[in-house]
Amino acid sequence: MTTTKKLVGTVTPQQRDEIKTLYERKNGLTELFKIVDVNNTSLYNKLVNDMGETATKFQKWWDDQSKTNQWEGKKEHHWEINFETCEIFLVNDGLKK
């Protein structure tokens, strides 16, 4: 199946920067999970907590923006941002069934 993208809106550069910071943090934490020893419980627990908080803030940003801007949404689709243009796309990557 092929990926389809539909432009559904835009955000301001400030809003883009908010989600970009969360996106980069989430990716960084994901990479740390790959190298942190689970036996180092203090560090591991801190990482788990930070990932939970970051993932919650990330999803809240999308939920708030989609509601405020009334972006089209569909089951088995997700939104994606182009960080250069601040455009928001509704994406179906064909992977979800």
Image: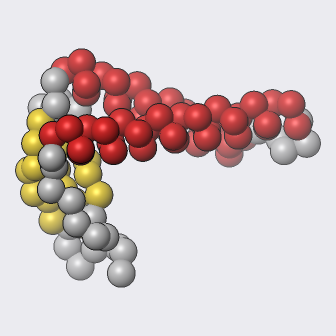
Foreground residue, 5 or 70? 70
The answer to whether residue 53 shows anywhere in this view is yes
Q: Position of residue 45 (x, y in %)?
A: 79, 37
**In percent of the image, x 25 and y 38: which residue is there?**
65
Q: For the point 86% across and 31% down, which residue is it?
A: 42
Q: Residue 33 vs residue 16: left or right?
A: right
Q: In the drawing, does residue 51 fall left or right of residue 63? A: right
Quarter of the figure that contains the N terminus: bottom left
Residue 59 position in % (x across, y down) = 42, 43
Residue 50, position in %: x, y?
64, 32
Residue 24 visible in the snapshot: no
50 relative to 35, above or below: above
With respect to residue 78, does 10 lie above or below? Answer: above
Q: Residue at x 35, y 73 (%)?
A: 95
Q: Which quadrant of the rendered structure holds the C terminus? A: bottom left
Q: How is the image coloured?
A: secondary structure
Percent of width and height locating residue 74: 22, 66
